[in-house]
Amino acid sequence: MQKKIETKLPKGVTLDRDWRTREPRYYFRAAGRKKVRLHQEPGTQNFDDEVACARLGIPYVPLDEKPRPKPEAPRDVKAGTIDWLIAEYKRRTVGKISQGKWTRRANMLEEIAEFQFGKKKARVGGLPFLDLKRRHVLKIRDELRSTPGAQNEVKRAISAMFSWAIDNDIAETNPAAKIKLLYSGDGYHTWTVPEVRQYEAKHPAGSKARLMLHLALYTGLRLDNLAVLGRQHIRDGVLTMRPGKTKKSSGVVVEIPVLPELQRTIDESQTGNLTFLITEFGKPFTTNGLGNKMRDWCDQAELFHCSTHGLRKAGATIAAENGATDEELMAIFGWTTKNQTTVYTKKARRKKIAAGAIQKLIPES
């Protein structure tokens, strides 16, 4: 009997079993809205898309049946309001940025529109968008979310919408443009070398778990790219891929040599025809499915605080400590600015300076 793979459900999704047949039924629930029955298989891209549509309140149509309808601006929206601007932004940007990013921004903007603030508890969406000022964005950011990372997402969503509005001659200024991002800590835990060895000790050469570790560590690719990475991306010892996150923005292409250590792991492992990493049924992983599997592999190695993204950070840290420059890190990891790279290069320089200066703490005799 095949073992059932447990899939972590997205936020807002619940499992209700039929009381007679015990058949699983999945629903999306949101406060103040009617629950939505979900029919796709959890852990698949179709399921993720169906949940995204349920969040936005639009009908879901599988991509293999017919094109998904674009969200239209509500008829009762007053022109010139933030509601109107959000509706226009959603309508005119769908399909022009990655589906995941578009969905996250749309969800955040809809939540911002419903937010009420001020003495009169004015609803943000009903206010004229030209009247939105920097102080209003700060107030919305600080009252809508409580942690720095989440507050930064509020700022990013508003800034992205107004940047689009400026490019399309709808607005002249961006009220969120000069608001600095809040420091939200180091985010995902960065793997240490002993943790990598601990994982390898649990998952031997030839295992899918070992292959996943080395693909992530020695390429610096994100989870969504690792899920589709295959032999077709490697030619003459060079891995070439356009990361999904930058495909519709900078269009940067990552071109990196395949390290001998990684090639050896690939050769030792069972891989699929189109993707290196495959499920127990021989099919490619979805992004969420691979993330859940990596979570299991880390837990099996008792690395409960480690994650796939932490390996990307570990690779950048190791490279920086080995002397990689900002430009070299940008080439390896597909970054287009030094905002990301300086985090690692500055930390590496500080570590080396401290190591060379520590003896100066000893008083002279």
Image (tube, helix red, strand yellow):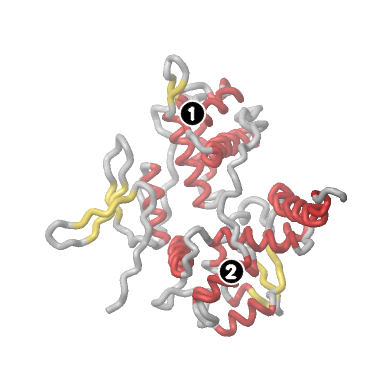
The label number, if any, that marks residue 196 in the structure image: 2
Residue drawn 53% across and 76% down? 201
- Helix, strand or loop under label 2: helix
Residue drawn 66% across and 63% down? 315
- Helix, strand or loop under label 1: helix
Placement of 214 over or under 157, stated as above or below = below
Which sits in the foreground, 154 or 203? 203
Residue drawn 69% across and 79% down? 260
The label number, if any, that marks residue 175 in the structure image: none
Which sits in the foreground, 218 or 55? 218
Q: Earlier in the sequence, mark 1 or mark 2?
A: 1
Q: Name which residue type carries label 2.
A: Val
Asked whether residue 326 appears in the rendered view, the answer is: no
Asked whether residue 195 appears in the rendered view, the answer is: yes
Give the quarter of the image for residue 333.
bottom right
* For residue 250, side relative to residue 18 (left or right): right
Q: Name which residue type carries label 1.
A: Glu
Give the quarter of the image for residue 244.
bottom right
Placement of 316 over or under 214, stated as above or below = above
Q: Are marks 1 and 2 in contact (CB under 8 Å)?
A: no
- Residue 339: percent from left, percent from top: 71, 47
Residue that extends furthest to the right in the rendered view of this protein: 365
* For residue 262, side relative to residue 294 (left or right): right
Query: According to the image, label 1 marks what residue?
Result: 143
Q: Check disc 1: other Cα within 10 Å, few if <14, some if 14-19, many if 20+.
A: few
Position of the N terminus, as image quadrant, is: bottom left
Which sits in the foreground, 303 or 211? 303
- Residue 345: percent from left, percent from top: 75, 54
